[in-house]
Image (cartoon, rainbow, N blue to C red):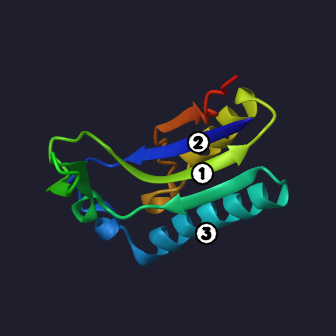
Amino acid sequence: MKYMLMMNTMKAGSTGLSGWSEKDIKTMIGFMMDLDKELRGSGELVFEEGLTFPNEAKLVRADKNGMPITDGVFPESKEFLAGFWIVDVAGPERAYAIAARISMCPGPGGAALYMPIEVRPVGSPPTTK
């Protein structure tokens, strides 16, 4: 079964990694790369990607003529989606185990960040008869 593991982290408007040392950033990136390599090797990783900070995002909706209307991300957002993984695993317990490992990604000084990771099954479109 496929699951999306969403790394919701940092408050919107935060400076992100700018306060981190170069060593801490390299450690965090190395952790993520090692995890991705392990999941790819086990055949469980379908796709993963990091995302830019919310200041580069736009909310889009259609006007009455179907033309796009864009707006910035609202600053009252508590957290934002920093990255995600799509994994194909035997069941929710394995998805939870992977999410727990992601949650322990090292931050400044190598201490685990204990980030919240949302785990959501990837749904299939409804079938028509």
Q: Give the left or right position of residue 7, taking residue 39 as reference.
A: left
Q: Sequence order check: which comes first, mark 3 or mark 1? A: 3
Residue position for label 2: 4
Q: Sequence order check: which comes first, mark 2 or mark 3? A: 2
Q: Residue furthest top?
A: 129
Q: Position of residue 53 (x, y in %)?
A: 31, 61
User: Which numbered marker is on residue 30?
Assistant: 3
Q: Give the left or right position of residue 20, taking residue 101 as reference.
A: left
Identify the residue shown where x is 70% and y is 54%. Answer: 46
Q: Give the label, 3 or 1, closer to the camera.
A: 1
Q: Position of residue 47 (x, y in %)?
A: 64, 57
10 Å neighbourhood of mark 2: few (<14), some, or many (≥20)? many
Residue 71 falls in image quadrant: bottom left
Q: Give the label, 2 or 3, closer to the camera.
A: 2
Residue position for label 1: 85
Identify the residue shown where x is 63% and y is 48%. Answer: 86
Tag 1 secondary structure:
strand
User: Which numbered marker is on residue 112?
Assistant: none
Residue 15 falls in image quadrant: bottom left
Tag 3 secondary structure:
helix
Above-or-below relation of 93 to 102 = above
Above-or-below relation of 69 to 116 = below
The quarter of the image holding the N terminus is top right
Whether residues under marks 2 and 1 lie with C-beta atoms below 8 angstroms apart, the answer is yes
10 Å neighbourhood of mark 3: few (<14), some, or many (≥20)? some
Residue 67 falls in image quadrant: bottom left
Marks 3 and 1, Cα distance to the nearest angstrom? Answer: 16 Å
